Image: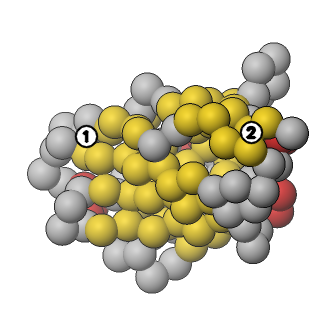
Amino acid sequence: QVQLVESGGGLVQAGGSLRLSCADSGRTFDSYAMGWFRQAPGKERKFVAAISWSGSRTKYADPVKGRFTISRDNAKNTVYLQMYSLKPEDTAVYYCAAVAALVLKTNGEEYDYWGQGTQVTVSS
């Protein structure tokens, strides 16, 4: 069973940085590829980044390329999203998700497990 809990969200000024964490209390974390998604008020959920089970492969949405970095520590059952140069348009609830797949997926409908989300607010 995978149980995901996000943390690290908060209020930050434009240009600032935050690091989100997503911890899995289960025992099969390294069997899953992981993804981060975000949903702004009144908008649909969108893909942000994904990482393979080993951490060797990553994929990013165009709006965050060069500013966000996804990583994982399988010994700690945790995936991270380091966010730099934050912009007001990055404001959203951020969700981590897990999928039992070898390929990196950008479609949230294909993910098997989700966390409860953490709010990120970037002020201008």
Quarter where residue 75 is shown: bottom left
Crowding at label 1, few (<14), some or many (≥20) Cα neighbours within 10 Å? some
Mark 1 — residue?
Answer: 2
Q: Is residue 67 left or right of residue 21?
A: right
Alpha-carbon span between mark 1 and mark 2: 30 Å
Residue at position x 80%, y 48% from top?
A: 14
| Residue for badge 2 | 122
Q: Residue 108's x, y, as percent? A: 60, 40
Quadrant housing the C terminus: top right
**Nearer to the camera, 1 or 4:** 4
Say if 101 sits above or below 117 in the image. below
Please identify, in this view, whether the residue under mark 1 or under mark 2 is nearer the observer: 2
Q: Furthest-top residue in view? A: 42
Q: Residue furthest bottom?
A: 56
Regarding residue 42, the answer to whether it shows in the image is yes
**Going 27% across and 61% down the picture, which residue do you hit?**
31
Query: Which comes before the other along the chain, label 1 or label 2?
Result: 1
Q: Of helix, strand and loop, which one carries label 1?
A: loop
**Amino acid at dot 2:** Val
In the rendered view, does 71 fall on the left or right side of 16? left
